[in-house]
Image (cartoon, coloured by chain):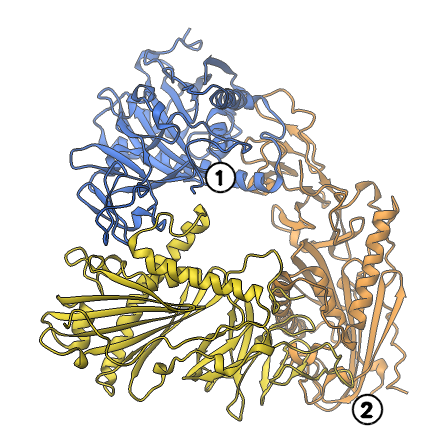
Chain colours: A yellow, B orange, C blue
């Protein structure tokens, strides 16, 4: 009866991997509210934290007359449908159907594996038998005493793969972000060469160094320094939909070991074929207790990603109108996005062809200062 | 040329009966206005009352360039199109086409049989040759000196059959209507047994008695009594889309003959496949001249049906998303809704298979006090 | 990759001619703004005036990631995409792709022939090899020292052919425009006979004379005369989508040579299958320097065409609901609209069947005072 069961329907184009953990939100979102209801890969989920502190998710639909459970009530750790009062345990078992001694055997709700790790919620939409906790990617920078995060969320009106294209393409900053992290035509970022490498199955890196540049507004702000700087930038994509921008900036006179560095976590999860949840955390390695800086970086990042979201939504509309491949004509800046798509498509194929296959996410980044050509 | 002609198109799933009278509104709605325009079974109708007091309906579309007649003007009992001034008599005949001596023979508008009975308007969307006035169901309680009605209307964003499911299911009160006519988990209405009977072709009854209960807020209000009460409730459905809730409440010390009794008329008419006109009248047998009570009951009923309309709209959205049968898993509370659907489907089949067949609506209820088990 | 290339797709119903010049706007619209972006025949165009005063149009889509160029920036006569900074010359050549020595060969934008004539912009959506300037229709009254125009624009939510039907039908004035140029039932315009003639390939005229009538409000205003008048009216349609209403009014005692005369230019261009650009200019032959009259005529015309736009939008909605031919039943007032449609359909067929065929637009009107029956 359901539109989106565990296995992909034969003959349907599959746009996403299934047997992976996707980010479902920040763990703290479940505190102090009865639940959070959200859609992932087209499946509506209701997520809650039990009195014992466990997190749990069910498909957000009553098996009786299809009302969303999120239109009902919570009693302790149980959910009660708002139409006929059916009660469900956190594992989806129907505990009571008012008006009869016991509920029908088929009146259970599909449980969706959910766990909390690194301050994030991770949900599994694929075969639950394969949902091993050790397959959760390492995103420790979201909650690590050595790093302070500025966190946020954007709902993007675009296919998650357009979002990944955007994050892996180090060429759009100068135009989309000219008022925040880019520099416009004067000091054109795309002119600095990018080295793209496939760092393992499902893992792509694009690295660039910009020695001795005028700091764009965002970097002048975080460094509290208006003289010329060195800047590096590594965009990392890992299947199915996690990206990280590892950047470092430091005055030209300083050492890269003293760099203000950040791991910008871009935690994408498809909501539907044309919309994406974009959870993000900008984790920095300096001024860890500076709450004003945390908030200033949050605001600046939010504004920067607003610029991306506007472009991505336009691009999605154009794609739906014109159809065809993306990009229509490939440029050099597309090398990393194209390699990222190929890595993803290879894993989507493996998932379809190898029963029981699960992608094991490799580490995305090394915390040691990278070896830089510009420092030599 | 028209989307919805008299006969159903071959190969299309038919969701409703055609050769029956549907409620098109309250008769008083036509007083003091040029017309009322409304859609029934997908057909747009314009209804008016002539100077002689006759009611009349036409399809609301000019045969020339398709403008709705309701975008034009009324002159006496004639309708004039607002684009080229064609004038139509109340029977759909074109009386004048400006610019030519006489109108073309084909320039007539389809007349839709309409009549007034029991203070209601009744419209016939099927074969006009079969539209006999004696087939109008008996809904006299809407205008009867022994009963005082509180009337209203809801536009429901759901298939009329979901509305009927809701009205015939005596199990949702405790949750949907916990603040009005239900009682929540404390005194759970579904625990009282329901007796379902098929009372004739197209006629289903579900009866329940609740002796010695705390009165829900609505019943305490109408009885002006806060002690424990006896309550009975009979939900009656008659094809194609009329329901009635016959209820009685009285203090436990009193006799059922003294009960405050009501026939709640639920007069449903499909507007489109996914929307329903819901005209209603709560006719009571006590305090007939108490205008404050009439208004208080109107307000309370409006609020109660608001609760249903919200649930039904959600359910319709979920059905369009998930598809499948209704209910997905059947409970005991579904016995009456399921029997009601079967009775309707049987009549839809008879209509399709027996040319000239018309359903003759039986009486829905007996005004005598019912024989009650709880009174014995 | 594109939805709307130069040639019509085989098997698709073609609703419009392609190898003709369509009005794209007023020339002055390009002054003082970076560009005007507008859709024609389903194709999005961006139009600009270069520093040298030339007009130029490109398809409004970047070949890289499909962003509209109108979401980017203009530098001198070049357009720069707002996503990755690609720069395009006014002829669509890609001049620069940041991050690489030279742009890919395929990274050009489709140029759309555009020229300025008679104060109007004319765009060619068909085969550019056929776009000869001498095929531009004569619309000199929009900018002619002997005529003073009042200009405006309506965006109409209807197929352009419904707009032409409306303009060629001299029967709707009495009802749609009863408050502006019509007279209602009292002095019913359709009763005056209309002479319809096919004046050449793609050219239809409908002429009517109304001697000795009460002046409708608009004509009383322009004449500044409240006594009875003579009025003539010639509606002219020329394929693919240009109409003109040539009218003259004068006091019954005066000579037609002294008439207040106007060529009302109705410059229609399909935006999509269901929406139309309606540029208009009411050019008059009297009181040429009266700026107050120019503005009063603009306001009155705007109000009159608002009335048409409302009716046309309703008719379009009804057509999409009911389908079928237009008109559903033909009246005498439909003679000119039907002949106009036939003339258009014949040319659409010629275009499909004769490769290289281009319609040569004949003159629409003669400025000499027409020979009038009512003057005799």
Q: Nearer the viewer, mark 2 or mark 1?
A: 1
Can residue C176 be seen in the rendering of this structure? yes
- Tell me the residue at 45%/15% (across/down): C201
List x then y, in percent, for residue C96. Answer: 22, 46
Q: On screen, C320 above or below B200? A: above
The disc placed on residue C274 is 1
Number of residues whose C-alpha sits closer than 10 Å to that of mark 1, classed few (under 14), some (14–19) or many (20 or more):
some
Task: Report the front residue among A263 and B344.
Answer: A263
Task: Report the front residue among C40 and A247.
Answer: A247
Task: Report the front residue among C108 and B302.
Answer: C108
According to the picture, the residue beneath numbered tag 2 turns out to be: B253
Number of residues whose C-alpha sits closer than 10 Å to that of mark 2, classed few (under 14), some (14–19) or many (20 or more):
few
Q: On screen, B3 above or below C225? A: below
Can residue B26 be seen in the rendering of this structure? no
Lateral position of residue A235 relative to residue C320, left or right? left
Q: On screen, C16 above or below A189? A: above
Q: Classify mark 1: helix, strand or loop.
A: loop
When asked about the image quadrant of residue B230, the answer is: bottom right
Q: Name the residue furthest top.
A: C376
Which chain hosts label 2? B
List x then y, in percent, for residue C6. Answer: 41, 32
Which chain hosts label 1? C
Q: On screen, A191 above or below C146? A: below
Task: Determine the CA span between mark 2 and mark 1.
Answer: 70 Å
When asked about the image quadrant of residue B151, the answer is: bottom right
Q: Classify mark 2: helix, strand or loop.
A: loop
- Tell me the residue at 63%/76% (across/down): A110
List x then y, in percent, for residue C220. Answer: 36, 27
Lateral position of residue A64 relative to residue A187, left or right? right
The disc placed on residue A238 is none
- In the picture, the quarter occupied by the N terminus of chain B is top right
- In the picture, the quarter occupied by the C terminus of chain B is bottom right
């Amino acid at each position: 009866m359901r539109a989106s069961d565990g296995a992909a329907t034969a003959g349907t184009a599959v746009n996403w991997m299934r047997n992976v953990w996707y980010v479902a939100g920040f763990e703290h979102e479940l505190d102090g509210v009865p639940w959070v209801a959200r859609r992932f890969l087209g499946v509506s989920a209701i997520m809650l934290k039990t009195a014992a502190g466990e997190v749990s998710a069910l498909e957000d639909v009553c098996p009786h007359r299809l009302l969303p459970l999120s239109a009902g009530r919570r009693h302790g750790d149980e959910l009660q449908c708002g139409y006929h009062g059916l009660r469900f345990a956190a594992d989806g078992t129907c505990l009571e159907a008012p008006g009869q001694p016991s509920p029908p055997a088929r009146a259970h709700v599909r449980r969706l594996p959910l766990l909390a790790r690194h301050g994030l919620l991770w949900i599994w939409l694929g075969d639950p038998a394969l949902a091993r906790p050790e397959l959760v990617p390492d995103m420790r920078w979201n909650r690590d005493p050595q790093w302070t995060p500025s966190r946020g969320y954007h709902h993007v009106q675009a296919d998650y793969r357009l979002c990944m294209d955007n994050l892996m393409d180090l060429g759009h900053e100068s135009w989309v972000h000219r008022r925040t992290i880019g520099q416009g035509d004067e000091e054109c970022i795309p002119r600095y060469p990018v080295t793209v490498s496939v760092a393992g199955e499902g893992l792509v890196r694009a690295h660039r160094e910009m020695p001795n540049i005028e700091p764009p507004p965002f970097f002048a702000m975080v460094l509290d320094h208006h003289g010329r700087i060195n800047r590096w930038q590594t965009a990392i994509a890992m299947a199915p939909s996690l990206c990280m921008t590892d950047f470092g900036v430091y005055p030209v006179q300083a050492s890269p070991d003293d760099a203000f560095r950040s791991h910008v976590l871009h935690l994408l999860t498809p909501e539907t074929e044309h919309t994406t949840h974009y959870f993000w955390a900008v984790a920095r390695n300096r001024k860890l207790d500076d709450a004003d800086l945390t908030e200033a970086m949050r605001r600046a990042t939010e504004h920067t990603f607003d610029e991306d979201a506007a472009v991505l939504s336009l691009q999605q509309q154009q794609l739906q109108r014109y159809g065809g491949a993306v990009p229509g004509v490939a440029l050099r800046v597309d090398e990393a996005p194209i390699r990222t798509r190929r890595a993803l498509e290879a894993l989507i194929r493996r998932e379809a062809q190898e029963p029981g296959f699960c992608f094991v996410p490799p580490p995305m980044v090394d915390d040691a200062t990278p070896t830089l050509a510009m420092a030599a």
